[in-house]
Every structure is written in structure tokens, then in C-alpha cells.
Amino acid sequence: MLTNEVTKENLNKLVVSFYTRVLKDDLIGPIFKDVLGEDMKGDKWQAHIELLTNFWASIALGDFTYNGNPFAPHVQFQDKLSIKAFEQWMKLFFVTLNTIYEPQIAQQFLARSKNIAGNFIRNLQLS
Ligand code: HEM
């Protein structure tokens, strides 16, 4: 059942479900595997999932559990990034959002992530 309510629990579900799709993706899966490994149950993935749950909670719930620099780590693998890779990221994120949230909430997350992705693309000077 789709929900209109954003909670820490459903944000965690969103993040886990999104990365499950990401790992199966031929274009962007390998980029994540290079940095975090193949096994989502591994320590690096578990830390990443917690970090990203906090990232979205800070945006959507204002709970201040994330205070990192979202852009910084992407510089280390920028040679593997492209506009096409970001478009695929957005596509998988949108598909996942729509399995959890009502369209109005999904749209808000999508708008926010599009904005952030646009900043990343500009800062990394991707084509
Ligand atoms: C093709 C696009 C993308 C790829 C391949 C990618 C990949 C990654 C990887 C591998 C990490 C872990 C880095 C590490 O632990 O060293 C990471 C971190 C992160 N990513 Fe992305 N990412 C992409 C797009 C995005 C977008 C669009 C957003 C936001 C809407 C985002 C938000 C974050 C955040 C918040 C972190 C954690 C930063 C920190 O360490 O505090 N990423 N990303």
C-alpha cells in the first residue's frame, strides 16, 4: 500500500529497495560495487544505507541526522560518471519512490534529487 507519510522506517525501505535495483543495473551497478562491494549485507553497504537513510531523513523530516558533504565522495570516481549514469540513477530512484509513496510525495523526492543531481553534474562538468 502506498503511503503519504514519510517515516524513518519507510525511508530505510526506500534506500534498501533502491540499492537492490542499483546492484542489478548494468550501467551504474558496477560503480557502486567498485566502491562498496557486491554484498549489500557487508559493512560498507550497511554504513552507506544508514548514511543515506539519514541523508533523506534530514531532507524530508528535518531530523539533522546527516551532516556530511553529499558531493565530496563522488569526485573519487568521477571518471566513471556521466549524464547517462545520472539519468539511470534518477530512473531507478523514481521507480522505487513510486512503490512506496503516493505520487505527490514521490514527486517531491524526485524534484529534490533532480536538483541535487543537476548540481553534481555541473560541479563534475559531466557530459
Ligand atoms: C550515477 C549517479 C551516482 C553514483 C554512481 C553514486 C555513487 C555513490 C557512491 C559509490 C557513494 C559512496 C562513496 C563512498 O563511501 O566513498 C555515494 C555516496 C553518496 N551519494 Fe551518490 N551516487 C550517484 C548519485 C547521487 C545522487 C543523485 C545523490 C543525491 C540525490 C547522491 C547522494 C549521495 C550521498 C548523500 C552520499 C554519501 C556522502 C557522504 O559520504 O556523506 N548520489 N554515491
Image (cartoon, helix red, strand yellow):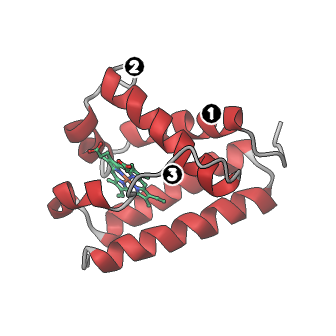
Say if residue 20 shows up in the picture: no
Q: Amino acid at mark 2?
A: Lys
Label 3 sits on a secondary structure element that is helix
Residue under pointer 1 = 13
Residue under pointer 2 = 41
Q: Position of residue 110 (x, y in %)?
A: 61, 63
Crowding near the residue tagged with mark 1, few <14, some 14–19, many ≥20 C-alpha atoms within 10 Å: some
The residue sitting at 20% across, 39% down in the picture is 34
- As measured in the structure, the alpha-carbon distance from the residue carrying label 1 to the one carrying label 2 is 14 Å
Quarter placement of the C terminus: bottom left
Closer to the eye: label 1 or 3: 1
Q: Amino acid at mark 3?
A: Leu
Q: Position of residue 52 (x, y in %)?
A: 49, 43
Crowding near the residue tagged with mark 2, few <14, some 14–19, many ≥20 C-alpha atoms within 10 Å: few
Task: Name the mark on residue 33.
Answer: none
Residue under pointer 3 = 92
The residue sitting at 66% across, 47% down in the picture is 63
Quadrant in which residue 78 is drawn = bottom left
